[in-house]
């Protein structure tokens, strides 16, 4: 069986790795990197650290407005699919790479497997939400990470081809946390476990909105402990454009983007995590680190229901209150599977191939 896997952003690199390892045992798996994350620290470093095979195709699309970026990806992915003629394509999550892959494949009548299907924030102002919905409704096989995701798909009338597999990022986390134990990032940054907060900001609604970005920066600047802030290129750009550099106080340690293994160790040892990332909310939950989410909603509702994650938006007072007072009080549940989602995905694809 020939499979084309399409990735383009940091979380997709992480998710695809355990799946790739399973598929390569008995199938031809071709990796296509759209180049959506074009910065070395945000892309190539992940391939090096996680020992992901070099993509056969690197489309080099880079950044841009959503329509332009998605359109260029669609054109280039279609070209690759016409050359390779795969039995399946695999798409991951909710990026523009995901949507472009789905549109290219469905028009060529190539079967689509969507890993991390069924997630919903129910906020259509988020580009990711549109990408998820369109990708799910284009896919033939939908690999749902949670029971909530299965329920969301049923609500939208999608019953066939839906499989509850668990979460491939949990597979990756179980493997990579062992590697991360060898990280010396705490020593490099001169910090100690549980004595710092970790934050990431990259979402358009926070970076492109000057008021939201300022609220977050001012709240972080009032945190009494050290705040480690690996700064996304997008966030750095808008901090400079809005001239907010002077608002960043000495307790905030701005660092360049770092490799996934080092970042994982920073997550594991943080006192709390403040983020607008979906994937990091989930990683925080799996690592048993309280998470403060700088958004109005989340696709990982289980983390909020279990009270290990709190939504504070960009409200300065809510952020500071959560920094001081938010302490999880509920027991965690096994929402994300048994760490064997990748094997289940391989078995399902093989079964589909035989029936075809």
Image (cartoon, helix red, strand yellow):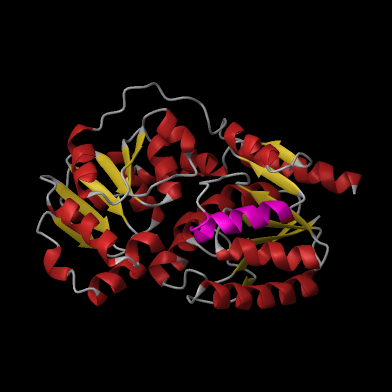
Above or below, 332 against 252 in this view is: above
Which residue occupies the foreground of this view, 258 or 72?
A: 72
Q: Is residue 270 visible?
A: no
Indicate whether 159 appears above or below 54: above
Residue at 27% across, 67% down: 210
* Range shown magenta: 124-137
**Residue 71 highlighted magenta (yes or no):** no
- Is residue 291 among what the camera can see? yes
Q: Which residue is drawn at the image coordinates 23% and 75% (left, top)?
A: 240
- Dominant SS in magenta: helix
The foreground one among 162 and 127 is: 127
Q: Residue 319: image x %, image y %? A: 23, 45
Total numbered circles: 0
Q: Which picture quadrant has residue 196?
A: top left
In the picture provided, is 31 more to the left or to the right than 307?
A: right
Give the residue drawn at x 78%, y 75%: 83
Q: Camera-side residue: 10 or 47?
A: 10
The N terminus, quarter of image: bottom right
User: Horizontal and vertical percent for residue 125?
Assistant: 49, 58
Residue 72 position, x and y percent, is 61, 78
**Up-down relation of residue 162 to residue 29 (above or below):** above
Q: Is residue 167 left or right of residue 256?
A: right
In the image, taking residue 184 as reference, residue 175 lies left or right, namely right
């Amino acid at each position: 069986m020939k499979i084309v896997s399409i990735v383009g952003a940091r979380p997709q690199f992480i998710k695809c790795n355990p799946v790739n390892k399973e598929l390569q045992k008995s199938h031809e798996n071709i990796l296509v990197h759209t180049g959506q994350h074009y910065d070395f620290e945000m892309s190539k470093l992940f391939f090096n650290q996680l020992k992901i095979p070099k993509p056969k195709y690197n489309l080099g699309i880079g950044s841009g407005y959503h329509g332009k970026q998605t359109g260029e990806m669609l054109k280039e992915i279609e070209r690759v699919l016409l050359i390779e003629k795969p039995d399946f394509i695999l798409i991951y999550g909710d990026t523009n790479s995901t949507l472009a892959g789905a549109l290219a494949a469905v028009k060529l009548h190539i079967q689509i497997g969507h890993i991390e299907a069924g997630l919903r924030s129910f906020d259509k102002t988020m580009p990711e939400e549109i990408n998820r919905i369109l990708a799910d409704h284009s896919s033939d096989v939908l690999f749902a990470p949670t029971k909530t995701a299965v329920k969301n798909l049923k609500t939208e009338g999608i019953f066939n081809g839906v499989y509850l597999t668990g979460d491939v990022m949990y597979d990756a986390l179980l493997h990579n946390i062992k590697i991360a134990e060898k990280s010396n990032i705490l020593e490099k940054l001169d910090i100690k476990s549980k004595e710092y907060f970790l934050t990431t900001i990259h979402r358009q609604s926070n970076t492109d909105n000057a008021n939201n970005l300022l609220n977050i920066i001012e709240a972080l600047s009032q945190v009494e402990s050290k705040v480690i802030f690996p700064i996304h290129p997008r966030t750095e750009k808008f901090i400079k454009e809005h001239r907010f550099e002077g608002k960043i106080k000495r307790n905030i340690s701005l660092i360049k983007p770092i490799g996934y293994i080092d970042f994982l160790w920073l997550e594991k040892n943080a006192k709390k995590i403040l983020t607008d990332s979906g994937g990091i909310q989930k990683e925080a939950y799996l690592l048993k680190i309280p998470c403060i989410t700088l958004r109005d909603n989340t696709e990982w509702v289980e983390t909020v229901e279990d009270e290990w994650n709190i939504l504070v938006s960009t409200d300065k007072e809510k952020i500071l209150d959560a920094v001081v007072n938010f302490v999880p009080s509920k027991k965690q549940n096994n929402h994300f599977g048994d760490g064997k989602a990748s094997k289940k995905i391989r078995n399902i694809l093989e079964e589909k191939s035989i029936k075809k």
